[in-house]
């Protein structure tokens, strides 16, 4: 194991005091606590600037390790059987979780130890396991007694015939586990409570000294097992509830606390200045002040606040920065890209042309087109109080005959647009109508499938908002597109990626979706000529 000394200036826990939740009948066993601390601090970091260096515990980490492993009942077994640690992103959660898993496997004196790592899916499950595997590989002493099976996410300890095995939510209906240790990473991502219940309800009854170690950021679903555990932890911390077997740690701001106060950032992020650079937080904060989506992400991942994963995205004052008159004659013959959001046959179809700027003085120009079945217009007006009939008379929406969209009408219209403008590519939802795609290709158009998930939608969506905010996009105040912009709600994932979501938006957003797809093609092809925005400064990732 690594031999270096603690870096100068790296903080260490001083004057340890046992948890306030230690029972009068329990006591602090320093030898057991020291054993756990020593084991973990002889492992190595695997990421960032500390990679390959000894895993020196920060004060908050050592406090919980000493509390969990050192506070014991009269029989010598641990008082706390469940530890719930809720803390913000980038504090070293994965490394601490991996270290605890390895201690339970190698040093907890449990014969035939069964340690499980739980996660929502295989990708999430790989995170902590890969860290644990690297820690073992960097420890000659552990490697001598171990077999590492990367494909099956399993580490075997020959010394006690035990193993560390990763499970995901897909096996949540299976039973027969005899759990000595459970490390549950990011429980807020669990689709339901099934896996948690299987691994914690009765599965440890045959073990004398089991431990369930749950470490997570806050989540977005207040009807989840994660929020249930969060509520229990807060209730215990604030004296409304008692459970001597449950160890609660919550570093997060409440709804009424000031997320903009830098002092609060230190309050909820005990690793700030060590595993987290405060300048990174300041940069993220500045972005959050300019974009509602980034504000939600900052509150959630940086301040560990329980928030909604969805947020209304485009304030009207931001959108209306593009309300300039468009010189239609000047656009004829110009290069442009298109996004096609093809509806079901009874709904709105949107086709949006995006004209990229040809020099620094020009702006992006948006031309949207919309179609609805003629016979559905009265029903739409009545049901949603949206003036489809007025927009149709004004020419902002085109009605196709009957009660379903006639794709051949749209195809002919696009064909005519292709004679007026130089449409270089048409991006479409890959789950759209195959026949229309084939027909458009037959007309000579280049048609490009475009995914609707976080991976594909996040970069151009962030760019779309940025361009709007900077006033570098003209849409001419089209009332249909304006209405759709006001409807847009976005989803945010734990990595800070965003996508517009039709399911959670209050009304139609098809035109914005099509515009984002068209913008993506603009930017990508801009790179072929004069360097992509994505290439120049990378994707906007917070």
Image (spheres, grey):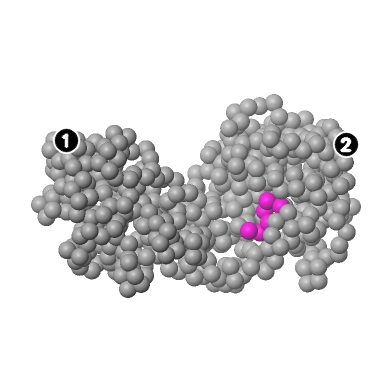
Q: Dot 1, how many residues are within 10 Å of its Cα: few (below 14), some (14-19), or many (20+)?
A: some
Q: CA distance from mark 1 to mark 2?
A: 72 Å
What element does badge 2 sit on?
A: loop
Q: Earlier in the sequence, mark 1 or mark 2?
A: 2
Is residue 414 covered in magenta? Answer: no
Q: Are marks 1 and 2 in contact (CB under 8 Å)?
A: no
Can residue 64 be seen in this snapshot? no
Range drawn in magenta: 90-95
Placement of 53 over or under 426, stated as above or below:
below
Residue drawn 54% across the image and 52% down it:
494
Residue drawn 11% across the image and 55% down it:
394
Q: Which mark is residue 403?
A: 1
Q: Which mark is residue 306?
A: none
What element does badge 1 sit on?
A: loop
Where is mark 2, residue-wise? 159
Q: Position of residue 395 (x, y in %)?
A: 13, 53
Is residue 91 covered in magenta? Answer: yes
Q: Position of residue 236 (x, y in %)?
A: 64, 52
């Amino acid at each position: 194991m690594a031999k270096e000394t603690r870096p100068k200036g790296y903080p260490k826990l001083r004057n340890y005091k046992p948890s306030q939740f230690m029972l009068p009948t329990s006591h602090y066993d320093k030898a057991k606590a020291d054993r756990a601390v020593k084991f973990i601090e002889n492992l190595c970091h695997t990421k960032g600037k500390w990679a390959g260096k000894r895993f020196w515990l920060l004060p908050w980490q050592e406090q919980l390790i000493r509390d969990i492993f050192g506070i014991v009942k009269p029989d010598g077994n641990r008082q706390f059987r469940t530890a719930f640690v809720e803390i913000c992103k980038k504090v070293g959660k994965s490394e601490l979780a991996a270290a605890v898993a390895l201690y339970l496997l190698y040093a907890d004196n449990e014969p035939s130890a069964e340690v499980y790592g739980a996660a929502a899916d295989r990708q999430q499950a790989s995170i902590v396991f890969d860290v644990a595997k690297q820690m073992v590989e960097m420890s000659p002493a552990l490697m001598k007694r171990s077999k590492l099976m990367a494909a099956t996410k399993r580490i075997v300890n020959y010394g006690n015939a035990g193993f560390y095995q990763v499970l995901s939510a897909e096996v949540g209906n299976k039973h027969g586990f005899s759990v000595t240790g459970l490390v549950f990473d990011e429980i807020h991502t669990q689709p339901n409570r099934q896996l948690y219940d299987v691994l914690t309800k009765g599965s440890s009854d045959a073990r004398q000294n089991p431990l369930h170690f749950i470490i997570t950021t806050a989540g977005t679903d207040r009807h989840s097992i994660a929020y249930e555990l969060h509520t229990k932890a807060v209730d215990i911390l604030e004296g409304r509830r008692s459970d001597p077997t449950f160890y609660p740690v919550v570093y997060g701001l409440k709804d009424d606390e000031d997320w903009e106060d830098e002092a609060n950032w230190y309050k909820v992020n005990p690793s700030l200045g060590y595993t987290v650079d405060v300048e990174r937080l300041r940069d993220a904060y500045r972005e959050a002040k300019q974009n509602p989506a980034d504000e939600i992400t900052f509150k959630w991942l940086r301040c560990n606040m329980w928030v909604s994963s969805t947020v209304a995205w485009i304030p009207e004052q931001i959108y209306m920065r593009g309300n300039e008159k468009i010189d239609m004659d000047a656009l004829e013959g110009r290069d442009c890209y298109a996004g096609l959001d093809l509806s079901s046959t009874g709904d709105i179809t949107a086709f949006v042309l995006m004209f990229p700027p040809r020099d620094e003085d020009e702006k992006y120009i948006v031309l949207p087109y919309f179609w609805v079945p003629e016979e559905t217009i009265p029903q739409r007006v009545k049901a949603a109080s949206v003036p489809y009939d007025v927009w149709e008379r004004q020419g902002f929406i085109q009605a196709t005959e009957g009660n379903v969209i006639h794709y051949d009408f749209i195809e002919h219209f696009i064909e005519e647009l292709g004679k007026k403008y130089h449409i270089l590519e048409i991006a479409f939802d890959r789950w759209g109508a195959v026949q229309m795609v084939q027909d458009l290709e037959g007309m000579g158009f280049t048609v490009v499938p475009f995914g609707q998930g976080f991976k594909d939608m996040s970069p151009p969506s962030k760019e779309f908002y940025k361009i709007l905010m900077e006033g570098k996009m003209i849409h001419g105040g089209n009332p249909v597109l304006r209405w759709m912009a006001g409807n847009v709600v976005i989803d945010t994932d734990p990595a800070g990626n965003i996508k517009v979501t039709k399911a959670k938006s209050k009304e139609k957003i098809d035109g914005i979706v099509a515009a984002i797809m068209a913008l993506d093609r603009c930017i990508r092809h801009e790179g072929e000529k004069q360097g992509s925005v994505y290439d120049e400064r990378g994707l906007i990732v917070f």
